[in-house]
Image (cartoon, rainbow, N blue to C red):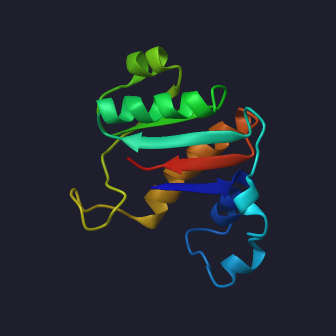
């Protein structure tokens, strides 16, 4: 699962609180010409990955990001798991660690997902991405 959001839109959602009105969301999205391709500068896209363990699948995801966006900032969040600092240094990405584990799907253990908690983690990643001069944040789901 991959989703992309403008960092400004993430900031707007967070400044208004957790309640988000999605009505009319598609009105502002212009899909005209997307089949021709969209281009971004080398650091305009930042990537956000959340996991509780470093796996070969995660390493392959980061290699794929590096293959197509070699200069893109990557934010790797340890979801209550171990400290990923050493592995992140090897992979050339930024490591952060959440104090407790949660799953992004409410129906999966440990059953403690909240929109507020999810948006707070996303806001921290967006703030970091903005500091890296990125204009868009890609949420790369494992």
Q: In screen coordinates, is 108 left or right of 126? A: left
Res 102 visible: yes
Image position, residue 137 (x, y; %): 63, 47
Q: Nearer the viewer, residue 5 or 82?
A: 5
Q: Could you tell me which residue is drawn at 48 percent across and 63 percent down?
A: 116
Residue 54 visible in the displayed image: no
- Outermost residue on the front side: it is 36
Q: Where is residue 111? Give x, y as percent.
A: 24, 62
- How many labels sit on residues? 0
Viewport quadrant of the N terminus: bottom left
Taking the spot 37% from the left edge, 58% from the top edge, the residue there is 104
Query: In front here: 124 or 29?
Result: 29
* Residue sitting at the far bottom: 23
Q: Is residue 136 above or below residue 55?
A: below
User: Percent from the top left, x then y, of residue 50?
Assistant: 42, 43
Point 57% across, 40% down: residue? 47
- Residue 103 rendering spot, x and y as whole percentages: 32, 55
89 and 11: which one is in front?
89
The image shows residue 60, relative to residue 44, as above or below, that is above
At 68% across and 63% down in the image, what residue appears? 15
> In which quadrant of the rendered view does residue 23 lie?
bottom right
Q: Quadrant of residue 59?
A: top left
In the visual, does 52 lie left or right of 87? left
């Amino acid at each position: 699962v991959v989703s992309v959001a403008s960092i400004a839109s993430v900031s707007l959602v967070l400044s208004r609180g957790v309640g988000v009105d999605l009505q009319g969301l598609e009105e502002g999205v212009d899909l005209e010409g997307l089949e021709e391709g969209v281009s971004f500068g080398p650091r305009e896209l930042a990537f956000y990955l959340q996991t509780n363990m470093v796996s070969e699948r995660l390493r392959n995801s980061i290699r794929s990001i590096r293959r197509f966006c070699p200069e893109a900032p990557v934010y790797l969040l340890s979801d209550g798991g171990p400290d990923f600092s050493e592995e992140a240094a090897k992979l050339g990405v930024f490591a952060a660690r959440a104090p407790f584990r949660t799953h992004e799907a409410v129906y999966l253990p440990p059953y403690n997902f909240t929109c507020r908690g999810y948006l707070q983690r996303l806001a921290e990643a967006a703030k970091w991405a903005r500091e890296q001069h990125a204009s868009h944040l890609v949420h790369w789901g494992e």
